[in-house]
Amino acid sequence: MYRTILLAVDGSHASRLATFEAAALARAMAATVHAVYVLDDREPLLEVAYLDRDALWRSMAEFGRGVLRATGDQLGAAGVAHTLALVEHCVAPGQVARTLVARAEACHADLIAMGTHGRRGLRRAVMGSVARAVLREWAGPMLLTRSNADD
């Protein structure tokens, strides 16, 4: 039985599907969902010479807050107890997966729910797979939803 679910959200279609599934599971088990949006603080992402780093960071944080508001609305409409958290600093630069696992451990999560994009080949090599990295780091059960929609 699951009592605490960590839900990783990123605003993608796969993430919205994960929210739907986590809400259904939480409602059935009277569990609490802890929705988390982690800002990706990889230096190469933020060190583009012609971008204002602070403006980019503020924009990313605002996007994350919007995703969390929408997630909270969806969980609230489903009647699910939940919390929302924007994580602005990873446990180490660019370590989104480790940060999610650390958050799951901190809230004593029984399950991590998240979307996966199902990227292959070069797209996966370039963009990486947070879901795959969480699978490697997390010893507990996971609920992965895959979307074929192109986000």
Image (cartoon, helix red, strand yellow):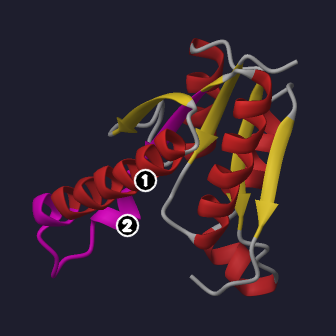
Q: Is residue 58 left or right of residue 131?
A: left
Identify whether 140 is placed above or below 122.
Answer: above
| Numbered disc 2: secondary structure | helix
Residue at 38 percent across and 51 percent down: it is 41
- The local crowd at label 1, few if under 14, some if 14 to 19, many if 20 or more residues have their Cα within 10 Å, is some
Identify whether 59 is placed above or below 2.
Answer: below
User: Which amino acid type is shown beneath numbered disc 2?
Assistant: Leu
Total count of labels: 2
Q: What span is in magenta? A: 33-56
| Marks 2, 1: nearer the viewer | 1
Q: Are marks 2 and 1 in contact (CB under 8 Å)?
A: yes
Q: Is residue 35 left or right of residue 126?
A: left
Closer to the camera, 123 or 71? Answer: 71
Viewport quadrant of the C terminus = bottom right
Closer to the camera, 92 or 36? Answer: 36
Q: Which residue is mark 1?
A: 40
Residue at 20 percent across and 66 percent down: it is 56
Residue 105 appears in view = yes
Taking the magenta stretch, the answer to whether it contains residue 12 is no
- The local crowd at label 2, few if under 14, some if 14 to 19, many if 20 or more residues have their Cα within 10 Å, is few
Closer to the camera, 31 or 138? Answer: 31
- Residue 81, x across and y down, in percent: 53, 25
Identify whether 108 is placed above or below 26.
Answer: above
Mark with earlier residue (2, 1): 1
Q: Which residue is mark 2?
A: 45
| Numbered disc 1: secondary structure | loop
- Residue 86, x across and y down, in percent: 36, 39
- Residue 88 position by quadrant: top left
- Residue 46, x across and y down, in percent: 29, 63
- Residue 76, x across and y down, in percent: 47, 40
